[in-house]
Image (cartoon, grey):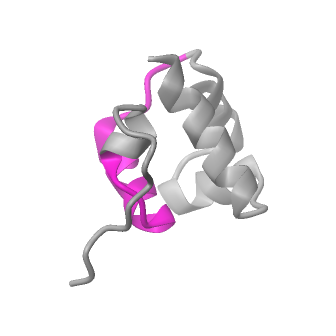
Amino acid sequence: MTYIYNRLKDLREDKELNQTEIGKILGTSQKQYSRWEIGESEIPFHNVIKLAKFYNVSIDYIAGITNTPYALPKR
């Protein structure tokens, strides 16, 4: 399960965003997002979906099931 926490941080840093900015996207505080990113608490699945869409990667990539961050198909 540690993969998800590393991926959350890596994806955020790749976009040069801070935790406060991602918290706003998810409708939560920087403090709560930080807890998710370091694995102190579990991120709700609906927020994983939001992040996958925002970063344009698969949920499998965020979860560490695959190392290929293939893009989601456009709708």
Q: Is residue 44 magenta?
A: yes
Which residue is depicted at the point 78% across and 62% down? Answer: 16
Q: Is residue 44 left or right of residue 26?
A: left
**Numbered marks: total:** 0
In the image, residue 19 sits, relative to residue 74, either above or below, namely above
Residue 41 percent coordinates (x, y): 51, 18
- The quadrant of the rendering that contains the C terminus is bottom left
Residue at figure coordinates x 62%, y 55% from the top left: 22
Q: Quick one: 72 or 41, which is closer to the camera? A: 72
Residue that appears at 72% across and 47% down: 19
Q: Residue furthest left?
A: 75
Quadrant of residue 61 in the image? top left
Query: Which one is in front, 68 or 15?
Result: 68
Point 52% across, 18% down: residue = 2
The residues colored magenta run 41-59
Q: Quadrant of residue 21?
A: bottom right
Q: How far across and how far down the image is residue 13, in percent?
A: 74, 52
